[in-house]
Image (tube, rainbow, N blue to C red):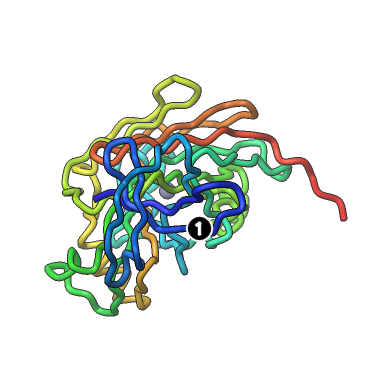
Amino acid sequence: MRIVRYLKRRGAKPAWGWVSEDRVGRLDGSPFGPYGRKEAKDHLERIRLLPPVEPGKIICVGRNYAAHAAEHDAQVPELPLLFLKPPSSVIGPGEPILLPPQSENVEHEAELALVIGRGGRWIRPEKAAEHILGFTAANDVTARDLQRRDGQWTRGKGFDTFCPIGPWIETDLDPADVLITCYVSGQMRQMGSTRDMLFPVLTLVAFISSVMTLNAGDVILTGTPAGVGPLRDGDEVTVEVEGIGELTNPVRSEKRQVE
Ligand code: ZN
């Protein structure tokens, strides 16, 4: 099943829904508890999709594909290399990625993301699948110059709009071998398979939960394949994940706000 959050019309309250072909129906309840499905009768084109979840935390994995580590002359980590993005960086499909004035080199990172359905600590790898609600596409937008200059990644990864996710949560996906592709203004930039992850999805859930309690709604970004590159004002960036769909966002320069 494909789970969405959406607005039926301007000013409406955000609702949970499910997608059947090109239509959306309401979910009675939340996907993290008991729910019922209402008839899918609203056209996807006539509603507005929101980020499919509002995560309490976003845990990301750096250098989880050897070819991406190599393009930055970085070592492959012996254990998953974790960092966080703030919940304020999340945007949904179609919302603009804003290029901040502090950076001259903002890049896309197309990734498979997963949404925790049932929380826990010390989750064993063989039990990890039971804690995953489903999967979505994500773009780990990164100000590469600031990431390099700071030596740690909070600023370079943490700007508002730097975490597009969507368009929905696919609950039926085997993440072992799905293609991740990234297009910028129609040009293909990245293509890789989750088969080439150094640490696969279930290992990541187990490892992260050995550090911090995972809660329902938390999102994990599983790393990017090779081919990351710059985003410029006026671009349109699409992350496509096989078996899920496409997440497209326009790119705009952020006007410096003066108070
Ligand atoms: Zn990343």
Instruction: From the top left corner, tell me how far across and down residue 105 is, in percent.
Output: 61, 36
Q: 116 or 100, which lies in front?
A: 116
Quick check: 140 above or below 61?
above
Q: In which quadrant of the rendered view does residue 246 lie?
A: top left
Instruction: From the top left corner, tell me how far across and down residue 153 is, in percent.
Output: 54, 56
Instruction: From the top left corner, tell me how far across and down residue 78 is, in percent.
Output: 28, 59
Q: Name the residue tied to disc 1.
A: 14
> Residue most toward the top?
187
Quick check: 125 above or below 78?
below
Name the residue: 22% across, 75% down. 123
Q: 75 or 47, which lies in front?
A: 47
Residue 196 visible, this angle: yes
Q: 192 or 242, which lies in front?
A: 242
Q: In which quadrant of the rendered view does residue 233 lie?
A: top right
Q: 7 or 107, which lies in front?
A: 7
Q: In which quadrant of the rendered view does residue 61 lie?
A: bottom left
